[in-house]
Image (cartoon, rainbow, N blue to C red):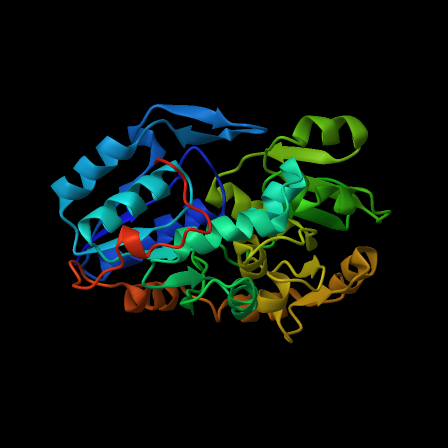
Amino acid sequence: MKIMIVTDAWEPQVNGVVRTLKNTRKELEAMGHQVEILTPLEFRTLPCPTYPDIRLSLFPGARVRRRIGAYSPDVLHIATEGPLGLAARAHALRRGMAFTTAYHTRFPEYVKARFAVPLSWTYAFLRWFHGPSHAVMAPTPVVIADLQKYGIGKVVLWSRGVDLDIFRMQRINKLNTDPPIFLYVGRVAVEKNVDAFLDLDLPGSKWVAGEGPSLARLKQSHPDVNYLGVLNQVQLAEVYASADVFVFPSKTDTFGLVLLEAMACGCPVAAYPVTGPLDVIGSSSAGALHEDLHSACLEALKIPREVARAHAEQFSWRSATQQFLNHLRPLPESGAVSTEKMSDEFRPRSV
C-alpha cells in the first residue's frame, strides 16, 4: 500500500514519537509498503511557546492538501494533534476520506503542567479531534482505558518495540564516575519530573542524557550531576550499558520507549507504579516500581542485568508495526464522517 503519515513531531526533535514513526516506516518498507511522511521540515515554522525545540508549522493547509493529493495514498494516518494534523484532518473530512489517528503523549497533562489549562478543556479538544477517526491508536491498555474514561471512543492498541541489535548487552565503562551509576534519558522538561530523581540522596553518581527547557535550571540547582546532552542511538546504547540503574521519574508518559532501550542493554529500571512503567515492566522482575522512588532505585540495583534483557526481548518493532497496519483503513471509503457530523463541543473557526 501507499501509506501517508502526517506528523508535527519530527527531526531535529529526539523523542519517543519520532523514534516510533521512524521504526514503523522502516518496518513497513521492509514489508513491501511505500511510506511518505509529511513533517514540519517542509513548512515555515515558529518555536512552540516555552518549548523552542518543537516547531509549529505556519498556515500549512494549502500545502498539506497539495501533498496528500499529489501522493494519492491508499491510507492516511494522522499521528499528532498539531497544525499539520489539524490541516490533514480538515482536508480528509472535506474530501470524505477515512483516516486513523494516534495518541502518543499525555497532551492534556503536559498542557496543564506548562500553562495550568484545565484537563477538561484539553480532553474536549481531543474528543473533537479524534472523533471522526476510524481508529485512535494508543500504546498501552492503561492509556486506552484513560482515553475511554474521558469519552474518546474507537481506541485500539498500537504497542511499541525496541531495536535489539543496537540496544544490546555490552557491559562497558562509558560513564567513568563513582558506582553505582543512576541514569535518566529523555526530555529535560517539567512534565518529566526529573527533579524527583536529581533530588534523591543516592550512592554513587547521577547522569542525565537529553535536552529541554529545564536543563539550564537543573544544571544550576544540581551542579554535581553529569549532563551528556543529546546522543545518537549507538552512543545511547553504550551509556545504558554503562549504567547500573535507569531511573524513570515521569508520571505522565504513555509508554516510555527509553524503558525498553535500557532493559535491552541489561539496565534494570526504577520508576513509579504509573502508566508507562506499569505497562512496560508489568509483573516482571525487570524493574522496581515503588511510590518511593529512592526505594525503587535501591531495589533495582539488585536485579540481574540478564533479567532486564530477557524482558526487553519480548518487544519487537515488527509485531508493533503489524498492529499499526491492521488498524489502517483504505481510501476512499464511502460514508466517511462529514464536517456536518462533527461534534460542536470543540470546533475551531478555521484551520
Where residue 286 sits in the image (x, y, percent)? 64, 68
Q: Nearer the viewer, residue 181 or 187?
A: 187
Q: Nearer the viewer, residue 99 or 122?
A: 122
Q: Nearer the viewer, residue 212 or 200?
A: 212
Q: How many marks?
A: 0
Q: Residue at x 31, y 63 (%)?
A: 134
Where residue 311 sits in the image (x, y, percent)? 56, 70
Which quarter of the rendered picture does the N terminus lie within? bottom left
Where residue 78 sits in the image (x, y, percent)? 33, 50
256 left or right of 92? right
Q: Residue at x 72, y 60 (%)?
A: 272
User: Within the image, what quadrant is residue 206 found in?
Assistant: top right
Where residue 14 sits in the image (x, y, percent)? 48, 39
Which quarter of the rendered picture does the C terminus lie within? top left
Q: Residue at x 54, y 63 (%)?
A: 143
User: Within the image, what quadrant is residue 110 found in?
Assistant: top right
For residue 104, say whether it is visible. no
Q: Residue furthest bottom?
A: 283
Seen in the picture, residue 118 relative to 53 is either above or below; the reply is: below
Q: Nearer the viewer, residue 41 or 224?
A: 41
Seen in the picture, residue 255 relative to 80 is either above or below; the reply is: below
For residue 289, say whether it is visible. yes
